[in-house]
Image (cartoon, rainbow, N blue to C red):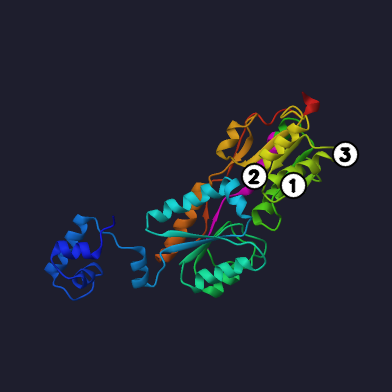
Amino acid sequence: MAVTISDVAHAAGVSKGAVSYALNGQPGVSDGTRERILQVAKDLGWKPSLRAKGLSSAKAYALGLVVARDPSLLGTDPFFPAFIAGIETALAEHDYTLVLSVATGTGAEERCYRKLADNGRVDGFILTDVRQDDSRIPLLQELSLPAVTLNRPDAASPFPAVSMDDCAGVTAAVEHLVSLGHTRIAHVGGGQEYIHGRSRRRAWEAALTKAGLRTDLFAEADFTAAGGVAATAELLRAAERPTAIVFANDLMATAGQSYAQSLGLRVPQDLSVVGYDNADFTQYLNPPLTTISTDPMLWGRVAAQVLLNQLAGVHSGGDTDLQAPRLLVRASTGPAPSTQ
């Protein structure tokens, strides 16, 4: 059971008012009494409640994360649990909490931001899924709340960004497949309204162009398993079907690989598959998935720390660049069918 001000007052033999003065550094008690109360509180293990701290300082001691995705994706895409765990790791060290809101439907996202800001429930926001010409940047400027973005927006933004280069991993994946003799390399991308969806597609296109290969085998999806299946089916219906597919996340890659196998295609003998994120389960697939290894937990922890630094008046003076993802080669990629 948590130790209360009443417990401290009883043990110190003083009133609750005297304890409040002492614990909050306010005048009203002598120095000797203050020291005695602080020692008793320490001995009892007393800790201030976040609500009381918030009321006394006009701070919420909470950060906001608004996710405008299908709620089911939070439970199925391994990126989000790991990313949120990273945020929580940083917040726990500073007695902050995370307020998570899932916004679906027209206008729901803006309403979430405004409600959290107007009610004073959060002190700042972490912005994920940054979009082209993202309307949340001017919205948060209007709300006068600090924020941090995952990757640098394409429009002007006053907020620091924590970035992870999407291009390097995708480029390495394409180069790996080219070295195996593949010439028909497809890409199943995420929504192209997202900065990371577009950057991964552009990296795929640039690597293919550099290799002198066509860039027509592209299918847009939505980072879900169902989207991965639909996009894979579309690509495999092509007159000249791909011999390799680079997916924008592991969830779509896993679903696409399973779908291809259900058609009788062998992985990697008939079709090579590459994912993105290196979710833990990918090493246990049959065959284990070649993927681009990222660290969403680190991303969440660093993003939260950057925002906490802003709130504490400590500014790093610029964006934070995390280590670029790297290609992790497993058994789902192999020589192109014509070169076996």
Where residue 320 appears, as percent x and y from the top left, is 51, 55
Sooner in the amino-acid sequence: mark 1 or mark 2: 1
Which residue is rendered at x = 76% and y = 45% of the image?
230
Residue marked by disc 1: 205
Verify whether residue 243 appears in magenta: no
181, 72: nearer the viewer: 72
User: Going by the image, does 69 lie left or right of 24?
Assistant: right
Q: How far apart in space, not on screen, are marks 1 and 2 (Cα)?
A: 17 Å
Sooner in the amino-acid sequence: mark 3 or mark 1: 1
Secondary structure category for the residue under label 2: loop
Res. 249 mark: 2
Secondary structure category for the residue under label 3: loop
Residue placed furthest toward the top: 340
Q: How far apart in space, not on screen, are marks 3 and 1 (Cα)?
A: 20 Å
Confirm whether residue 263 shows in the render.
Answer: yes
User: Going by the image, does 243 lie left or right of 57?
Assistant: right
Front position among marks 3 and 1: 3
Magenta range: 160-176
What's under tag 1, amino acid-wise? Glu
- Look at the magenta stretch and give its main secondary structure: helix
201, 11: nearer the viewer: 11
Res. 239 mark: 3
Q: Is residue 205 above or below residue 122?
A: above
Neighbours of disc 2 within 10 Å: few (<14), some (14-19), many (20+): many
User: Going by the image, does 52 lie left or right of 250?
Assistant: left
Neighbours of disc 3 within 10 Å: few (<14), some (14-19), many (20+): few
Which residue is rendered at x = 48% and y = 65% of the image?
124
